[in-house]
Image (cartoon, rainbow, N blue to C red):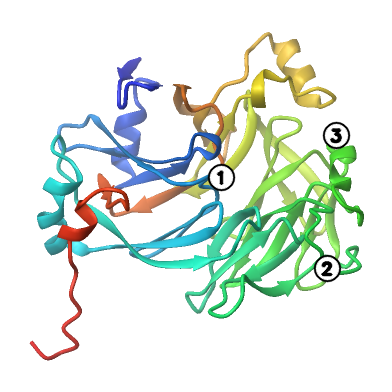
Amino acid sequence: MSSLAPPPALSLTTSRQFASWLASTGGSLALTTYQSGKLLIVGTRPDGRLSIFERTLERPMGLAVDGPKLAVATLTQILTFVDAGSAAAAGASAAASSTAPHDAVYLPQLAHFTGDLDVHDLAFDGHGRLVFANTLFGCLARTSETHSFTALWKPPFLSRLAPEDRCHLNGLALLEGRPAYATAVSTTDVADGWRDHRRDGGVLLDVPTGEVVCAGLSMPHSPRLCPDGQLWVLNWGTGELGWVDPNRGQFEPVAFLPGFLRGLAIFGGHAVVGLSEPRENHTFAGLHLQERLELERVAPRCGLMVVDLATGDILHWLRLEGVVRELYDVVHLPGRRSPSMIGFRTDEIRRVLSVDDGGIG
């Protein structure tokens, strides 16, 4: 087992082969830490060791990747960063970090001011536009140039759009660039009603039809579609990663993971799953997860686990301790082994410029 020490307030340990596995993917992982306000990028150096890059953002949650673009949902904004490319990266490396080389540098380029919509899952649609789970209003929405959001779809069981978090709609999966599935903790139509249905009131919804594809879930999160069309979801109230056959409406668990499951990236036959500890030292009272943890005699963890989708085996893991106790999302950054990111709060944003010459030379 290898041990790393990025910032003093963050303790990070990994399984022995985590770094070599990550290097073999040809990319890196970005994850948001929610309550501690950190966006972490975990990559690999040329010598095979892990590289850890950190930026402070205000309550970062959903992440989305579209080629060189990386979008992050924060408390009141959705921020879009763009990889400046190798030429700009060479000039930005010194400003971004004095200790490690970086093969990509994400520059902040665009901010959509949404207000506090409690934005959860985030994605780029087939036209490169940002769509997201607007949890406060219980709908799917798109960013707007003139408003906080443009509503795209709401579940049929909601009577109207209202800023009341009635069902805790949180997850979003796209098919061929269009919203296809969404998850909600309940089908309630009253303010904050979802909290009374955490144990078994969760649903997976078909967006085009509005129908419930799978019911009886426990706080489902992070629906994701594989390239082969298989539909995966995290049933965090039971601590299980599984898949759903929309025709049968049945959740099929594949792996139990000890924690509050949120954040799912699927690539190369693997699932990278985010795990969190209980909030404010509370147990997962009333949920199957608490019962399962006690049965297995294991403590909840915060970090990432890499699961073989074919077998359900946990192949690799990364554990976070200290200031970080809760994750929201994780994405794979293909082709970028050790990225950095330019921040807003130091002079480096003034010194790094990228130019589109418009063809004038």
Above or below, 92 relative to 7: below
Q: Position of residue 100 (x, y in %)?
A: 16, 37
Q: Position of residue 278 (x, y in %)?
A: 66, 24
Q: Secondary structure at mark 1?
A: strand
The residue sitting at 44% across, 46% down in the picture is 57
Query: What amino acid does circle 2 point to?
Result: Gly
- Find disc 3 in the rendering and name its residue: 199
| Image quarter (top left, top right, bottom left or bottom right) of the N terminus | top left
> Crowding near pointer 1: few (<14 within 10 Å), some, many (20+)?
many
> Crowding near pointer 2: few (<14 within 10 Å), some, many (20+)?
some
- Find disc 1 in the rendering and name its residue: 264
Above or below, 156 relative to 4: below
Rounded to the nearest whole Å, what is the CA distance between mark 3 and mark 2?
22 Å
Mark 1 or mark 3: whose residue is earlier in sequence: 3
Please indicate whether residue 223 sits to the left or right of residue 265 in the image: right
> Crowding near pointer 3: few (<14 within 10 Å), some, many (20+)?
many
Please indicate whether residue 257 sits to the left or right of residue 21 in the image: right
Residue 356 vs residue 37, the one in the foreground: 37
From this viewpoint, is residue 216 visible?
no
Residue 205 vs residue 189, the one in the foreground: 189
Labelled pair 3, 2 in contact (Cβ < 8 Å): no
Residue at the limit of the structure toward the left, as seen here? 361
Q: Position of residue 121 (x, y in %)?
A: 60, 55
Mark number for residue 210? 2
Q: Position of residue 34 (x, y in %)?
A: 54, 40
